[in-house]
Amino acid sequence: MEKPASLTREISPPTHSRKTKPLQKEQENPKDGPPPVAAPSLAAIEAGEARIRDHLAYFSEHLSNVSRSGEKGAPRLSIDDFVKLHQRNQHPRGRHFVIHQHDHPVAGVHYDLRLQFSETSTISFAIPYGLPGNPNSKRQGRLAIETRVHNLWNNLIESASHATGSLLIWDTGEYSILQRQARAVQTDDELSGGSDHAPGPSPSAHQRSKSENQKLFEAFQATHIRLRLHGTRLPRSYTISLRLPPANNTTKAQATPRKRRRKSTFIPSRPMYPATDSDTDEDPGNGTVSPSLPRSRTASATPSAFHGGDDDRQAIEAANASEVEDEDQTTRTNNAYPGATNSIGSIHQRQWFLRLDQVNSGFVRASSGPEKGRWVRGLLNGGRGGPGGDDSKHGELELGGFGTFFVRGAEHERSVVTGRLSKDVFADEGVKGFLGRKMWRPILE
């Protein structure tokens, strides 16, 4: 029996019907183009493994998405003001600053102060215990250790990873550089608080024409910076002094160790830099240079130079350990991360002496009463209240200085931009099981 023609046709592969042709054509030439590429991760951008065109747009959107309501009454910078602040300083005369709280897995908690000195770059100081907030503290001195020169866009970052720990913005704003003032004999009027807090000499017309970052450049070269920070968290007129002791003024960076190891360091019998009044311009220690001391691989200066305790040894190790171990040779040679330019001449791990400038922050020494000899808040505008002597809002005298504050560490300090704690940053970035370095303690005395 002869087979029907319909059974003699091959059935594999099946024939294409006319209905499938338009679909096939559409699949071959999709109208929407290739599938979208996933946005780079925050960690990849921070590490320089991925590049984006608009850092401000990227980070401001990210910070907006992760913002918390925060504590009632806590200082806070809105995202809009955060963006405007950065835009205001995107030029060669910019004067942006940031203080990052960094909870590093090896280094532990420390604070990074970064100051813009050009259109693209910032100098960076690691401050193990954060900025001082008590004018009468028994531990006035702080170490401020130079780290790598960073890109300006690094000032925008809040991030977290197992490798680098958490990073949040403790404060941010703009800075001013005050002139150095010659040491003068204090008068009874100054001691009694009858005059305004003593500013530096009146700037000349030439000095006024300089940009703040040009003044920073010159002060950095002179190894003495009188720095006023106009932030959101820090109080009005908050001023610090940074000095580089002659013994620490090296011209080459310290060698980066291949392996990190902890080793006890020789402790001298007395502090290298005793506390001095903030209204003097002399080097701490009254010109006395301490002899060279043995140096371990991880501790590049004597921890007891300022406070004389084990905490400081760990703090210096922490500041040194926070550097990336696999940096390329160009980064180490130039002391600058890719994209940044070290035109200011920053030298890796030089150790500066930082302290609160009580006088320029608005404090005076009390000459009588129970507070005699202590720093107290002075009166502004000759003791007549607000601007022009009129304080119509409160009818009270206006005080300089500020109430004492303390930097309490990762478990307490919140971002001034997002309101997050360190643990919140870890959670938002999906970092679980982070083990930070313990034994960090705030300076409360």
Image (tube, rainbow, N blue to C red):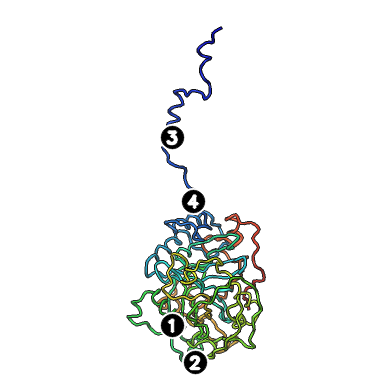
C-alpha distance separating marks 3 and 2: 90 Å
The secondary element bearing badge 3 is classed as: helix
Please determine whether, in this image, residue 424 is positioned above or below residue 208: above
Label 2 or label 1, whichever comes before in sequence order: 2
Callout 4 crowding tier (Cα within 10 Å): few <14, some 14–19, many ≥20: few
Q: Position of residue 60 (x, y in %)?
A: 47, 57
Q: On the image, numbered disc 4 is attached to which residue?
A: 39
- Mark 2 and 1 residues: CB-CB less than 8 Å, in contact? no
Q: Which one is closest to the eye, mark 3 or mark 1?
A: 3
Q: Amino acid at mark 1?
A: Ala
Label 3 or label 2, whichever comes before in sequence order: 3
Residue 255 seen anywhere in this rendered image of the structure: yes
Q: On the image, numbered disc 3 is attached to which residue?
A: 28
Q: Position of residue 267 (x, y in %)?
A: 64, 84
Label 4 or label 2, whichever comes before in sequence order: 4
C-alpha distance separating marks 4 and 2: 64 Å
Q: Position of residue 55 (x, y in %)?
A: 45, 58
Disc number for residue 188? 2
C-alpha distance separating marks 1 and 4: 44 Å
Residue shown at the point (47%, 24%) measured from the top left: 16
- Mark 3 and 2 residues: CB-CB less than 8 Å, in contact? no
C-alpha distance separating marks 3 and 1: 68 Å
Q: Amino acid at mark 3?
A: Glu
Q: On the image, numbered disc 1 is attached to which residue?
A: 222
Quadrant assignment, res 88: bottom left
Q: Position of residue 359 (x, y in %)?
A: 49, 83
Please determine whether, in this image, residue 386 is positioned above or below residue 45: below
Quadrant assignment, res 372: bottom right
